[in-house]
Amino acid sequence: MTDRELIEGCIREERACQEELFRRYAGKLLSICRRYARHEMEAEDLLQDTLIRIFDHLDKFEYKGSFEGWMRRIAVNTALKNCNRIGFRKESIGIDAGQDQVVDPEAVSHLSEEELLHLIRELPEGYRLVFNLYAIEGYSHKEIAEMLDIKEGTSRSQLVKARKMLQDKIQALKTNYYEHKSF
Amino acid sequence: MSTNPFDREVRRKLKNYESPVSPDLLEKVLVRRQRRVAPFHSWGFRALFFGLLIFGGLAVWYGLLPNESREEVPVPKQKKSELRQPLAFFENQQEADLPEAVESVVEQNVFDREEKTVFSENSQTKAIAPKGNEHLKQARREQGTRSDVSSSGVVAEQILAPDAGKEKSVWLGHQEGEKIPTEMAAEQRSASSDELTEGEAESIFLPTALLWKLPKEAKLGPRKFPLVPGPRCADFEQGVWQFFFDFTFSPDFALRSIRPKDEQSVPLALKRLETESAKQSYSLGTTFSLVSPGGMSFRTGFAYAQINERFAYQGDTEERIIISIIYDDQGQIIGTDTSYESYTPYYASSNVYRLFDIPVLFGYQLDLKKFALTFQGGTYINLFLAPEGTFFSPELQPVSFDEIPAFRKRASLSLAVAFGVNYRLNPRMSLVFEPKFRYFFSPITTKDYLLEQQYMVVGLNLGAKLRL
């Protein structure tokens, strides 16, 4: 079944098409929600809200781009709607940008996806949002600033801090792993 | 797109990662969607909502409309020449249809007292018209066409102001060829120095339509002219059935009781009491009231109520390892510092209970001059809509309301009592301040659920009441 057939079936509220859409994309959408949510319950709530919005607005999809990309944007927007943006204004700006490359990128590949997701979720909310939007979703700082109603400079500084904190965590996990292994 | 190698690696790892999804999640989504669609997104509900909105808007518009703009007696232009003695005040008026003559003025403060409106064809009281605009309608009937007016004379309006036995009145218009009462009154004045004895009529002549044209500050001689027909005194009609339309909003506070049905359910009850707390609730609605001549009232309509609660709990204490990397002055890693930290995750969300109510209230309304006091009691028919939120399951795990059939869906009744004060802004519109109390006769939980959850609600209805 093509995406178009799937969409048209869902618009007609056909249960089989809804199940197929869920089977194909719910896992990916849940991964997005988990990156933005603070815990599993919130992630599941976000996924539910995302799917409801997708089913509600399928008739507005214009087949101009990727269907998956369209759904990912809905998931991200739903997550952003849910997040607490006050956290940004309390966080100070400015960091030594020279220290953001402390972990070999290869270290990431040794982590499982679940471990990486877990580490990202441990980031403070502001860091987590900016890192997700910039590093994974591919938005520019300008777009992030508009989406989160913050300054571009804030977005940049949050990204650097987020990246550094994540690298520290990866390093710590690695260190911990080797310590355990040495026993 | 970030070109940082670290970002790129994270993106590669997570971009297409699929998390395992609970297979029943689709069912939950579809159920939630279905509940959300009905009734709020059904066409029937929309039609009802917009119908009420339009009706409310029309009622507000009608209530705010000044009386005089609803009914206006046309001014017969050809009568201008027949009117006498131009009044100084009206000489400055620009409007072509403004009559220019007023015979004389005797009384100065007609509107200080309760007023009655009387019509006469022959400058004599013929019938007492009912309150409101009936007299104007009658005037139109009596006027007919302009030629009728000129042939049969101008319809006159007399405003009587009885005060301690002294009848005071204002005559408007006159009969052609007839000696008008003010002339007679003037003759009486000149004939006798004992003017305006008790029981003597005081008269002023004005064309009926002039009533609507006179500004408040209009003066006739040294006295302030009082004939502007607004603002009026309270226009309560004794002996007439009255029909009201209310629109109210109420900030509410819901008092909840949770009772275990057996001893095994006590821990669950305690857990729920510990983790759920009241938040600000509200209700809003429109009602229609019928008030008898004796003040007895019946009130019904539609209302939407929402009870909000906060669900918050702390999870189990967990421990995490924090490893800090130590850098030297050149930014090189020279070591790490490991510490352990205990933390307790905290979760919070909102629980929402929604009700669609049909009030059936009986009561009494006492009308005072500027206020009306109301007392009402009766029942609300409560239709529970699907609640949303999180609570603890019998296994003491936080779960969504959807996962346990704890709340019933059938209708129930609640006792309602309200004591209100209505402040009249004008004869048609009042402001409503109405403290209220509601007690739900039965729990909102199902028979099979381990606890009984029941509510009392106190609130303050604030809104507007329109007399239809």
Image (cartoon, coloured by chain):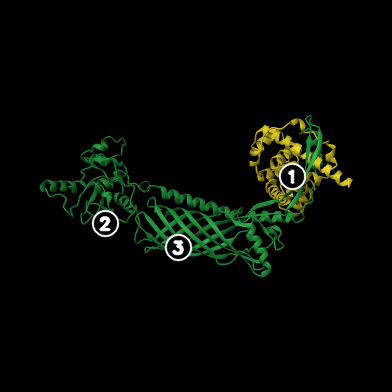
Chain colours: A yellow, B green
- From where the camera sits, is residue A95 visible? yes
- Asked whether B135 or A24 is in front, the reply is A24
- Asked whether A51 or B335 is in front, the reply is B335
**Labels 3 and 2 within one chain:** yes
Disc 2 marks a residue whose amino acid type is: Ala
**Which element type, helix, strand or loop, lies under badge 3?**
strand
Please state the horizontal and vertical placement of residue A72, each as a whole percent of the image.
Answer: 73, 43
**Which element type, helix, strand or loop, lies under badge 2?**
strand
- From where the camera sits, is residue B15 visible? no
Please state the horizontal and vertical placement of residue B28, each as a whole percent of the image.
Answer: 71, 56
Mark 3 or 1: in front is 1
Give left or right: position of B75 versus A125: left
Q: Which residue is mark 1?
A: A122
Q: Which residue is mark 3?
A: B376
Q: Crowdedness of circle 2 by 10 Å Cα count: few (<14), some, many (20+)?
A: few
Give left or right: position of A99 versus B243: right
Q: Given contact means CB atoms under 8 Å apart, are the residues at marks 3 and 1 in contact?
A: no
Say whether disc 3 or disc 2 marks the residue closer to the N-terminus.
2
